[in-house]
Image: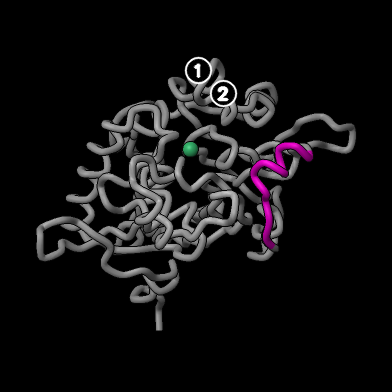
Amino acid sequence: MKFEILTMKLSVINTGFFKLDGGAMFGVVPQQMWKKLNPPDENNMCTWSMRCLLVETGNRKILIDTGMGNKQGEKFRQHFEPHGEDSLVGSVRNLGLSPEEITDVFITHMHFDHVGGAVKRDHKDKFVPTFPDATYWSNQAHYDWAYTPNARERASFLHENFVPLKEANRLKMIDIEEGVEFLPDFNIRFAYGHTEAMMLPQIKVNNKTVIFCADLFPSIGHIRLPYIKSYDLRPLDTLKEKGILHEEAIENDYILYFGHDPIHQCATLKRDERGRIVLDKTMTLAEALIDFIPK
Ligand SMILES: [Zn+2]
């Protein structure tokens, strides 16, 4: 009899930084308080990372989110100031992989800073999937929402970032069912506060659970309950979703993985002396998982 043991390997994929208005990112929290968490520039803009994650298991190489990519024009670049040494494909190559080797691209939601890298311009200036052999994953409710955006989210949902995936027949839809299994030890949480049916991967590596927080907890500055972005569609739902994940994270020692924190990759939570759930420790992904690296 043959036993196959699947091991899960996680790697950070940095795709660079961009800027968003600090006030919009912290909602009702006064600048006096949030500016300590992410110091703004003279235009009140804060720097955020676009940190993705690669999951390797069995013969699958699954990229979670893609950053904003590099196909936008000068006006867009002036507005969001993308910068930094890292790029999506560059970081994939740094791990010794070619774009053709990526089997799956999991898109938490279709806001440009998460899906922009999924599509590139080819040599004829046509929009094509960046990872030519990958299956791209979304869900129908979110796709429909992104395809016909409301006026508040319109600037974040750009058709060129995701319609070409559908046209190339590369897009598949995940069933919307809380906790649904995407792969063994890779389940999906759904959140509705930030945008419609955003998906948060929950990944078990040996005895640890890593939550890819997407835009539910974009950075360590968003751990406290009232620190909710003005961009969110339904802020009170975000509040509820944060509270639920808070309690679960404390109970089960979850590792939170941040897409937008400019410095910190991961953190754990604790209860403070007043009973509130707050940041415990920050760490790199490697530090978070180090107990399980075979000696
Ligand atoms: Zn978003």
In the image, what residue type sits under mark 1?
Answer: Asn
- Residue found at x 63% / y 56%: 16
Counting other residues with Cα less than 10 Å from the Cα at mark 1, is it few (<14), some (14-19), or many (20 or more)? few
* Residue 149 visible in rendering: yes
Question: Going by the picture, which residue comes out furthest to the left?
Answer: 274
Q: Residue 172, labelled with which disc?
A: none
Q: Residue 154, labelled with which disc?
A: 2
On the rendered image, what quadrant is the C terminus found in? bottom left
Counting other residues with Cα less than 10 Å from the Cα at mark 2, is it few (<14), some (14-19), or many (20 or more)? some
Residue tagged 1: 150
SS at mark 1?
loop
* Residue 61 visible in rendering: no
In the image, what residue type sits under mark 2?
Answer: Arg
Tell me, yes or no, whether the highlighted magenta stretch contains residue 127.
no
Residue 193 in percent (x, y) is at 34, 32
User: Does residue 139 lie above or below 97 as drawn?
Assistant: above
Question: Going by the picture, which residue comes out furthest to the bottom?
Answer: 295
> Magenta residues, as a range?
74-84
For the residues bearing labels 1 and 2, Cβ distance under 8 angstroms = yes
- Residue found at x 38% / y 40%: 27
Question: Going by the picture, which residue comes out furthest to the right?
Answer: 124
* The image quarter in which residue 23 lies: top left
Report the magenta stretch's main SS: helix
CA distance separating discs 1 and 2: 6 Å
- Residue found at x 26% / y 67%: 280
Is the CB atom of the residue marked by disc 2 within 8 angstroms of ligand 1's nearest atom? no
Residue in front for this viewpoint, 266 or 72: 72
